[in-house]
Image: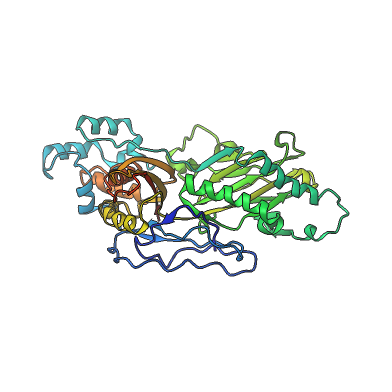
Amino acid sequence: MPRQKPRAQPLAGLAAASDGAAAVASTSGRAPAKAPAPAPAPAPSPAAPTPTAASSSQRQEEAPRQQQGQGVTVTAAAPWRGSSAAAAAPEAHGSGSGSEEVDDAAEGNQLSDRPPDWDPWSDPEVVRELEAQDIPVLPELCTAQHVIVRDGFLTPQLAGALRGVFDGRFADPRATHPERFVWDYWHVPDQYTLIRTQAAVYFPDELYAQLEDALLSYGETQLGCRAISPIWMSYYVDGCGQELHCDNPHGPFAFVLSLTMDWDKREFVGGETMILKPEVLNYWRSFDPRKGLELQHLVTRVPSPFNRLTVFDPRFPHGVRQVHGTRDPRKGRLVLHGWFTEPAPFFSGPLDPAEAAAALSEGLEPLWAALEAVSGLVSGTLISRVTISGATGAVTDLTWLADTLVEVPNHDRAAAEALLEGRVLPRLRALVQGEVKECLMGLTFPAAESGEDSHLTLPLVFE
């Protein structure tokens, strides 16, 4: 069972879990825990988003800290086109398909006159034209973050204690106690070379529980994720590294927590986390034949100083720059790593879970209809938290917790089709954010007898 927090309860009755949900299996030799069957709910319409839950593993002797819930997944559908687009997007050049205005606009905006990497939303001419016709250019309500860095993540006492266990067991290189023999030298030619172990096995139970609590609390409050995968600990000495790869099935966010000492005075080079930059994945949109590119233009290199937590979108190709230098484990790169899993709608506060689930299920119906048009055109995770008034049940505030939405290549084709038909395809990230905010701010829940406010965290996973 995954380690989870007890104070928040999931809204498990929204819909049935997807059969295609990815499972994160434990590497300890135990079978992965299975998510419980969700509460019965009305079957969603074919195009409506359905929740999915990712399983994680933990030590079997511990009880789960939360009930499991399901994240809401917007699955791929046909690209936005035809009547769906017309219903959601304003017309750019009048309603008459044979008008001179449409013909003149089409003549001056032939797609053949545009480069293949043309992005209409970054074209000042297009933006000015839309504004002149009173067609709104939708603003983005939050900025995509594919890499998040938090220094001083653990308390100094906890970070020091974890590092102390590692140093103590490597203090005498001639010692033969059992704790020296729990490491796996993992070598996959041309891909991975490192020495790893499971943190739950390596650290004393009490110390490991504090580490896990810190990661779970962060995942819950900042990422809308209710569980974590088993935590690995790895050290890198001369010759160790990871080539670029993607961890798509494991969870919506990966993490690296560094226990590396004296990073600025380290006795090796390399060891940074490398993450391919977004503009490289969309290379031709930003291509400039007059400029050359080097490594720093292609990847983000994140150093690993002591007690730094790095959270990133695991869909982005990433790796670890090869280490050259020391062969002493105590002087190498030492990190804890894993994935935040199970994005799920849940709430904290006095609101009754069953009543909350019913109100949310009914209130989200307009959002599913609005998002049907963008299914298959955006990919990623959008997580928000709303404050629910205990006195009235109304939503009084909305906070964006995490946003990794990207527009997929189908969006370019749909935009071209819209232009040829005299329509405007809105900026999709902004459109999704606006629809989500409008729906959530309009939700109404039962009032709480105590009058205290509650909080609802809602993850939307677009696939």
Q: Quadrant of the C terminus?
A: bottom left
Looking at the picture, does residue 189 appear above or below residue 456? below
User: Residue 362, percent across and down?
Assistant: 26, 56
User: Residue 417, percent across and down?
Assistant: 27, 49
Please, which residue is most extreme toward the front here? Answer: 450
Please give left or right for residue 423 compared with residue 455 in the image: left
- The residue located at (73%, 36%) in the rendering is 262
- The residue located at (58%, 43%) in the rendering is 310
- The residue located at (59%, 36%) in the rendering is 296
Q: Quadrant of the N terminus?
A: bottom right
> For residue 401, what is the image quadrant?
top left
| Along the viewing direction, whichever of 295 and 180 lies nearer the viewer | 180
| Along the viewing direction, whichever of 409 and 239 lies nearer the viewer | 239
Please give left or right for residue 146 compared with residue 168 in the image: left
Please give left or right for residue 429 compared with residue 284 in the image: left
> For residue 303, what is the image quadrant?
top right
* Total marks in image: 0
Please give left or right for residue 377 compared with residue 2 in the image: left
Residue 224 seen anywhere in this rendered image of the structure: yes
Residue 317 seen anywhere in this rendered image of the structure: no
User: Residue 144, percent across and down?
Assistant: 44, 41
Looking at the picture, does residue 104 appear above or below residue 183? above
User: Residue 127, percent across and down?
Assistant: 29, 32
Which color mode does the image show?
A: rainbow
| Along the viewing direction, whichever of 446 and 430 lies nearer the viewer | 446
Please, which residue is most extreme toward the right here? Answer: 174
| Along the viewing direction, whichever of 263 and 106 lies nearer the viewer | 263
